[in-house]
Amino acid sequence: MTESARIQPKVFCSYSWTNQEYQNRIIAIAERLMDASIDVLLDKWDLLEGADTHAYMEKCVSDKSVTHVLIFSDSEYTKKADSRSVGVGKETLIITPEVYGHADVTGKEQRYIPIVMEKDECGNAFLPVYIKGRYYIDMSVDENFADSFEQLVRTIYGKPLHKKPKLGKI
């Protein structure tokens, strides 16, 4: 596929409104994704007061123009997803069948990307049960943010850092 024929990446950000500082972190990541020419659907920009929040979440997850759903998971997201409570819980009800129904075990065609934003005191990632076994991008440590962000952008564009080489001749 030529670069001009490449599909424009469009992502939906699923996250918990844990606190204002955390929301600002998500907004900053979304702004950087926009700078990397990745269209971002984010409730803070796209959802207006009085709008149907459930319809918005359902539309964003089911919209075929959305190439990836980014699941920003911290302890609060994990708690809400596992208990199926409030907005995150509603998104979980929509996302779970999609995640479980996806047959690509390599993740090369994976639409749902878990992003760990927090770990517990033992270093275990906070991830909801439905996505716990998936390979994730770790953004829990500020010192590694640049590398993690590059990994995220590469994943969205389908440009991994390490490519399997072609087989040589005998």
Image (tube, helix red, strand yellow):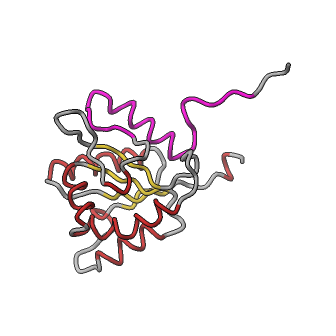
Q: Is residue 138 left or right of residue 164?
A: left
Q: Residue furthest top?
A: 170
Residue at image position (32%, 54%) is 129
Percent coordinates x, y for residue 96 in the rendering: 40, 64
Inspect the magenta stretch and tell me whether residue 155 lies in it: yes
Residue at image position (39%, 40%) is 137
Q: Which quadrant holds residue 42?
A: bottom left
31 or 111: nearer the eye? 111
13 or 130: nearer the eye? 130
Q: Is residue 168 left or right of residue 39?
A: right
Inspect the magenta stretch and tell me whether residue 101 lies in it: no
Residue at image position (53%, 59%) is 102
120 or 20: nearer the eye? 120
The quadrant of the image that shows the C terminus is top right
Relative to 36, say whether 102 is above or below.
below
Q: Which quadrant holds residue 69?
A: bottom left
**Bounds of the magenta segment:** 137-166
Percent coordinates x, y for residue 68 in the rendering: 48, 56
Q: Residue furthest right?
A: 170
Relative to 68, say whether 3 is above or below.
above
26 or 106: nearer the eye? 106
Percent coordinates x, y for residue 120 in the rendering: 19, 39
Percent coordinates x, y for residue 43 in the rendering: 30, 64
Q: How many marks?
A: 0
